Image: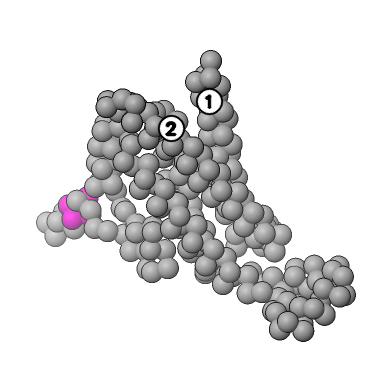
């Protein structure tokens, strides 16, 4: 009974992660569009991203703890459907983080008006305190976001690596085959140029052109 309850809890949390990632992707689509892009959209993207990161890390910690405990009890590893689903959801989210980084980098948003309006509604004493403490009232939103996304990407890449160790051999083999036949990006090094690695398909295309 306890196992069934735990399974249902994991399922509910994974469904929530799936919805959050879908929402994050939908929000990114509006970046750069005159009718939809706005400071409020960028704030929504930030909040949704942070929520996704926190939820992914939280659920991964719980599932990995369960996997490690089960591994100690039994010498035979077992397939955990929740781990498999979380692995692919987290992998998808990491790709979206890379996309969001480059979208925000090439399409910045002037957030000065947004922060000025917020400061206008603050208590005057708080504003004076910020000035006296030499704090920047209008932060560099883009710089903060790029740094935050970089940090989030490293954390997500790390937990993906930890989950990979418990992935079933068949799933791990399929993932290896998929990586070898598609373009792969160095997602954990998001601050550097994301250069797609050459694949077998690329080399075959080049040989065909030469012929």
- Residue drawn at point x = 40 percent, y = 52 percent: 158
Which element is circle 1 on?
helix
Left or right: where 116 falls relative to 12: right
115 versus 168 height, above or below: below
x, y percentage for residue 48? 62, 50
Position of residue 198 measured from the top left corner of the image (x, y, whole percent) = 24, 58
Circle 2 — which element? helix
Which quarter shows the C terminus? bottom left
Image position of 67 (left or right of 103): left
Residue at the outermost left position: 211
Number of marks present in the image shown: 2
Nearest to the observer: residue 40 or residue 201? 40
Please report the residue visible at 50 percent of the width from the left and 46 percent of the height from the top. 57
Seen as rendered, the residue at the extreme top is 1
Q: Which residues are magenta?
A: 201-205
User: Is residue 181 shown left or right of residue 97?
Assistant: left
Magenta stretch: residue 111 in it? no
**Residue under numbered circle 2:** 66
In the picture, measured across the screen, residue 196 lies left or right of residue 17, that is left
Q: Is residue 128 above or below residue 149?
A: below
Q: Can residue 99 be seen at all in this image of the molecule?
A: no
Q: Is residue 163 visible?
A: yes
Residue found 57% across the figure and 65% down from its top: 145
Q: Are marks 2 and 1 in contact (CB under 8 Å)?
A: yes
Chief SS of the magenta region: helix
Crowding around mark 1 (Cα neighbors within 10 Å: few <14, some 14 to 19, many 20+) is: few
Q: Mark 1 sits on what residue?
A: 6
Q: Position of residue 105 (x, y in %)?
A: 52, 69
């Amino acid at each position: 009974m306890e196992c069934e309850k735990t399974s249902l809890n994991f399922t509910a949390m994974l469904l929530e992660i799936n919805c959050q990632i879908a929402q994050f992707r939908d929000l990114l689509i509006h970046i750069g569009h005159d009718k939809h892009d706005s400071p409020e959209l960028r704030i929504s993207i930030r909040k949704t991203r942070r929520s996704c990161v926190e939820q992914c890390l939280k659920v991964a910690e719980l599932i990995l703890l369960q996997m490690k405990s089960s591994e100690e009890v039994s010498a035979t590893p077992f397939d955990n459907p929740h781990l498999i689903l979380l692995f692919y959801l987290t992998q998808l989210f990491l790709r979206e983080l890379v996309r969001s980084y480059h979208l925000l980098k090439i399409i910045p948003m002037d957030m000065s008006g947004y922060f000025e309006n917020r400061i206008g509604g603050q208590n005057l004493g708080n504003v004076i305190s910020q000035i006296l403490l030499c704090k920047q009232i209008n932060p560099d939103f883009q710089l903060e976001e790029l740094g935050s996304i970089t940090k989030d990407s490293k954390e997500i890449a790390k937990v993906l690596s930890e989950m990979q160790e418990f992935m079933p051999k068949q799933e791990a083999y399929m993932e290896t085959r998929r990586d070898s036949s598609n373009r792969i990006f160095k997602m954990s090094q998001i601050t550097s140029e994301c250069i797609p690695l050459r694949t077998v398909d690329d080399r075959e295309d080049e040989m065909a052109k030469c012929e």
